[in-house]
Image: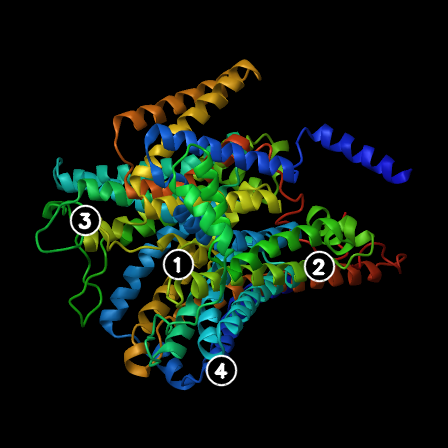
């Protein structure tokens, strides 16, 4: 049958690229392994906050806006438009959430956030798609405009409101959150017992069923929806073809401009939602400078995740987790992570030495691992400034070690004019 | 041909004028929509600045100029050094720590500190350059990450070496000895404020930028690589080495950005040291089209808007953050305007060629001339 033939064909291709696909089973296995590692780490170092449901809940809270920004990046970059204006669009989203949330209730605030982000996306789309301006240049300009517009509008609209002022909105109504009462408390007791591995797993599961904001659920749904739309529909195939080879897409009758435009608009809306989460869920208030560079981290999470939704979620979760641990436990918990990092680095180094015979890379990895291990045994804690740097250093390391394996859309960031191809 | 040259000049002047007009209109629309007084805002922004402000404008512009040149060096060969922001802070911190010790006598201390700043900025940018050349990491992403890392690193080290003054919560490095300060010029009458002595540094860097880029083999290679990498490779340019060198140079100039502030105003590096200069540099380099003279105008315009907007809150009751909107729109409008003008020029040229071809006897239908 043709379907069987197709399946065989796909298998061959994935085999040729030598990259295992992320099936749900594989992801579950990876999560369990990660929890196991953290359980061992907790036992060895005594840093109990490593897998507490509190820390994980905080991690989810911090991961959602990063993930939404990354999702925004994914949409536009899959259509071939680099978007470093995510930060600006996110800032616009925070103001939108503040303004509409204050006047018309939290749900309107969420829509307002998406809308304001979309306005930023529209500017980016007009500049890059219609006028063919360099994508990075336009992104830089949007970051300036977004910051200025949000501050200016905040001063204009929130001055004199009860509890608000030129730099912040009045308190916003909270959005509902969901938990599963029975499961949650049962897992809670299990977590309290501090049994090796079981309690850690309970902590992870508990954080996933307790007090989840609806926006978190919406974000998760958006990740699935994005995957489905981009990889399982004709629309998505055409959109991605614009990012891989717009000229080829044009010859097949795809209106490249329209697809790019839609992608960048969606991108802005997602980033705006990320900002909306910060204002409506994380803080219950709009505040100047609320995003704190999360748009950039979102972009990093997307690259970290190799321009794929699953990887993006992994990146966002990792950054959210390091951020949460830093905020809660501070230096002690991150200090415990050093041991894990050292072991992982040395393991990678040994693997590269013995299996792949890459002497230089292997030696470097082992040497760095040894230094990190030394750092762990000599010191008691990691200074706060260093823990704040963790996501950025992690991104840089991942890029440095695996940039050859990452593959961005082939025509990402390249200018495209209709009818001027080849 | 004379007429084409004239037209070209007209086109290249048309773009910035067009952009300023668009920025003016967009800002006015924003003001109208928000219900703010349009006329009063523009009167405030466009009044002749007082002598005190003129000094502040020139001083601000001299710092922005350095930052923009640092960015422009990268731009000329299609490298986006978003990391000037981190580079100048690392460099200013390193220089401030050294200069504050006062180990060397006055001018020598200044000179060595400048060297340290150049080396520190260069090395910090060099990380991104090395990652790009050896690991293929996009410099846009790596410099964004390095900016954040620089923030953490500098604030950590700052608290380590901080010169704790009793009764003050401002943390800074040791104050420079008086002999190592660079005196200013009292050029503007009517105010005791002085223009930074290190404005000369900006002028020198601008001259060096122009000479190196336009009058040396290296500059030629750099521009060639920026225009067409394959052509550069064909003419024997080692692109990897060019990328690394350009990044190091860009970082070295970025290292100088904080120097006028350090030696002419703050005399130490602390938590109040002016942030965000690197991002301003990106915008100004775009405004000035990477041209040393253009950048100077861009820096002055930027600084002018910033100083003039300070009075908005007090005099008109409008948030001075408005200036960010104006600045952002100007940047976007300028790049769009150049793109539109470039295309218009291209079309005009094509039409010219087509006309000339069809005027020639024997070729009534020119092939491929009309696009």
| SS for dot 1 | helix
Quarter in which the N terminus of chain A is drawn? top right
Position of A6 compared to B336: left or right? right
Report whether mark 4 lies on the same chain as mark 1. yes
Residue B124, image x, y percentages: 37, 38
Report whether mark 1 lies on the same chain as mark 2. no
The residue that label 1 is drawn on is: B296
The residue that label 2 is drawn on is: A259
Query: Mark 4 touching mark 2, by CB under 8 A?
Result: no
Classify 10 Å Cα crowding around label 1: few (below 14), some (14-19), many (20 and above). many
Classify 10 Å Cα crowding around label 2: few (below 14), some (14-19), many (20 and above). many
The residue that label 3 is drawn on is: B172
Foreground mark, 1 or 3? 3
Cα–Cα gap, marks 1 and 2 = 40 Å
Q: Chain of mark 4?
A: B
Position of B5 compared to B292: left or right? right
């Amino acid at each position: 049958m043709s379907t069987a033939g197709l399946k065989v064909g796909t298998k061959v291709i994935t085999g040729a690229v030598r990259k295992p696909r992320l099936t749900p089973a594989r992801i579950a296995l990876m999560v369990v392994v990660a929890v196991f590692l953290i359980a061992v780490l907790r036992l060895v170092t005594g840093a109990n906050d490593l897998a507490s449901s509190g820390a994980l809940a905080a991690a989810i809270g911090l991961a959602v806006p990063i993930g939404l920004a990354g999702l925004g990046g994914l949409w536009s970059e899959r259509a071939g438009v680099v978007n470093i204006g995510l930060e600006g669009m996110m800032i616009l989203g925070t103001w939108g959430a503040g303004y509409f949330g204050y006047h018309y209730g939290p749900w309107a605030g969420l829509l307002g956030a998406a809308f304001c982000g979309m306005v930023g996306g529209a500017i980016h789309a007009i500049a890059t798609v219609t006028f063919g301006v360099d994508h990075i240049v336009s992104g830089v300009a949007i970051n300036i405009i977004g910051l200025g517009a949000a501050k200016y509008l905040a001063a204009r609209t929130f001055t004199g409101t009860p509890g608000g002022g030129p730099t912040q909105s009045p308190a916003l109504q909270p959005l509902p959150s969901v938990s599963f009462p029975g499961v949650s408390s049962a897992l809670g007791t299990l977590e309290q017992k501090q049994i090796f591995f079981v309690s850690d797993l309970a902590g992870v599961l508990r954080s996933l069923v307790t007090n989840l904001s609806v926006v978190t659920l919406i974000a998760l749904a958006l990740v699935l929806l994005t995957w489905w739309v981009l990889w399982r529909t004709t629309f998505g195939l055409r959109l991605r073809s614009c990012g891989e080879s717009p000229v080829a897409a044009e010859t097949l009758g795809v209106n490249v401009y329209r697809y790019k435009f839609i992608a960048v608009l969606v991108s802005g809306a997602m980033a705006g939602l990320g900002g909306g989460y910060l204002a409506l869920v994380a803080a219950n208030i709009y505040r100047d400078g609320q995003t704190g560079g999360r748009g950039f981290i979102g972009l990093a999470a997307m690259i970290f995740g190799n321009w794929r939704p699953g990887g993006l979620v992994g990146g966002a979760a990792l950054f959210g987790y390091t951020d949460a641990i830093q905020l809660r436990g501070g230096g002690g918990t991150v200090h415990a992570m050093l041991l894990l990092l050292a072991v992982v680095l040395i393991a990678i180094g040994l693997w590269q030495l013995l299996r792949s015979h890459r002497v230089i890379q292997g030696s470097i990895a082992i040497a760095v691992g040894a230094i990190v291990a030394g750092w762990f045994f000599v010191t008691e804690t990691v200074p706060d400034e260093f823990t704040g740097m963790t996501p950025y250093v992690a991104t840089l390391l991942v890029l440095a070690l695996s940039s050859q394996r990452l593959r961005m859309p082939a025509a990402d960031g390249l200018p495209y004019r209709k009818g001027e191809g080849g | 041909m004379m007429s084409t040259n004239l037209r070209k000049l007209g086109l290249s002047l048309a773009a910035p004028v067009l952009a300023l007009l668009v920025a003016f209109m967009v800002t006015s629309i924003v003001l109208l929509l928000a219900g703010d007084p349009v006329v009063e805002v523009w009167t405030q922004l466009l009044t002749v600045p007082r002598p005190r402000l003129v000094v502040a404008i020139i001083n601000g512009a001299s710092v922005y100029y350095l930052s923009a040149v640092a960015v422009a060096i990268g731009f000329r060969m299609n490298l986006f050094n978003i990391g000037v922001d981190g580079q100048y802070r690392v460099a200013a911190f390193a220089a401030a720590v050294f200069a504050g010790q006062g180990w060397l006598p006055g001018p020598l201390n200044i000179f060595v500190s400048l060297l340290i700043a150049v080396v520190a900025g260069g090395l910090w940018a060099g990380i991104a350059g090395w990652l790009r050349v050896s690991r293929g990491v996009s410099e846009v992403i790596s410099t964004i990450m390095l900016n954040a890392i620089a923030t953490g690193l500098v604030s950590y080290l700052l608290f380590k070496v901080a010169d704790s003054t009793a009764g003050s919560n401002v943390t800074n490095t040791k104050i420079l000895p008086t002999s190592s300060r660079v005196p200013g010029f009292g050029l503007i009458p009517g105010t005791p404020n002085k223009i930074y002595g290190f404005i000369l540094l900006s002028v020198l860097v601008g001259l060096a930028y122009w000479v190196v880029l336009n009058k040396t083999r290296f500059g030629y290679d750099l521009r060639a690589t920026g225009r067409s990498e394959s052509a550069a490779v064909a003419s024997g340019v080692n692109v990897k080495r060019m990328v690394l060198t350009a990044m190091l140079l860009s970082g070295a100039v970025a290292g100088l950005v904080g120097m006028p502030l350090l030696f002419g105003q703050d005399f130490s590096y602390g938590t109040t040291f002016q942030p965000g200069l690197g991002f301003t540099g990106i915008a100004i380099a775009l405004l000035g089209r990477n041209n040393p003279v253009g950048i100077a105008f861009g820096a002055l315009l930027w600084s002018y808007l910033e100083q003039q907007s300070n009075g908005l809150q007090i005099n008109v009751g409008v948030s001075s953050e408005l200036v960010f909107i104006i600045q952002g729109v100007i940047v976007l409008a300028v790049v769009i305007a150049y793109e539109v003008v470039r295309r218009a020029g291209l079309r005009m040229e094509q039409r010219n060629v087509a006309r000339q071809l069809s005027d020639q006897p024997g070729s009534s239908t020119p092939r491929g001339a009309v696009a």
